[in-house]
Amino acid sequence: MQAEQALSGDTAAGLPLGLLGGTFDPIHFGHLRLAEEAREALGLGELRLMPAGRPPHRGEPGSTPEDRLAMARLAAAGNPALRVDDTEVRAQQKSYTVLTLEQLRAESGPLRPLVLILGADAFEGLPGWHRWKELFALAHIAVANRPGYAPHGRRWPATLSAELAAACRDRHSTDIADLRTTPAGRVIAFDMTPLAISASLIRDLVRDGHSARYLLPDSVLDYIAAHRLYRKGR
């Protein structure tokens, strides 16, 4: 897997590597704040933003993989703890997370802790993912505790399918040290700041000729304007 910048000495020493995937259509402050809070709360040495090339669980994005990759690079610029990984954009097949993790695991070795960051709704839908049970052998899973879920006690959705509950049995951890001492297999939750920003809102605003400023970095907004993304009749 190719990151946009070389790893620092501290990261190479074995601190957990966080992975935040998404369509990022476009990337916005909600994504970036989640990345920053995950990095801090989970003690990550590095966090990689991974734009999906061909998302298997939704329709075609409103912009091309290359545009979404370019916007992610612009958004991550200036934060040395963030990298942008173009593996899924370059891949010819659909962006299945298990395939990406297999590649990253092969390149990182068997001992480097990997942490897959998921929103609570994505985590709840995990049984619908391709070869989802194999994810636990490849990485830890960190679940972002978002608005609407209890801040105390169980740190993921209160209602899980029997299949997912069984797969998570004996994996739940509340100690981030577990993410450093083992390479994969734990499920841990962390709090995220609620930001009522969505990519669909931004696309709708741009389409209708309204301002989306302060919902995403100016550099990304300028890119959208320069390339006339999300506009009617494009």
Image: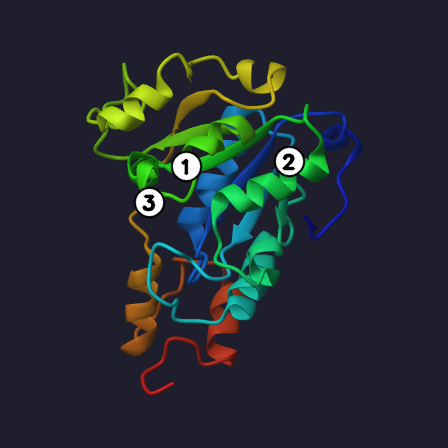
What is the quadrant of residue 216 in the picture?
bottom left
- Disc count in the image? 3
Residue at 37% over, 43% down: 129
User: Crowding near pointer 2: few (<14 within 10 Å), some, many (20+)?
Assistant: some
Q: CB under 8 Å between callouts 1 and 2?
A: no
Q: Is residue 160 above or below residue 230?
A: above
Q: Which secondary structure, mark 2?
A: helix
Q: Is residue 220 above or below residue 105?
A: below
Q: Name the amino acid type tagged 3.
A: Leu
Say which of 152 and 209 sits in front: 152
Q: Name the amino acid type tagged 1.
A: Trp
Is residue 111 shown left or right of residue 100? right
- Report the disc number at residue 105: 2
Quarter that holds the C terminus: bottom left
Q: Earlier in the sequence, mark 3 or mark 2?
A: 2
User: Crowding near pointer 3: few (<14 within 10 Å), some, many (20+)?
Assistant: some
Q: Is residue 133 above or below residue 201?
A: above
Say which of 226 and 126 sits in front: 126
Q: Which secondary structure, mark 1?
A: helix
- Report the disc number at residue 132: 1
Q: Which secondary structure, mark 3?
A: loop
Q: Is residue 180 above or below residue 37?
A: above
CA distance separating discs 3 and 2: 32 Å
Task: Look at mark 3 in the image and give the residue it sits on.
Answer: 195
Q: Earlier in the sequence, mark 3 or mark 1?
A: 1
Q: Name the amino acid type tagged 2.
A: Arg
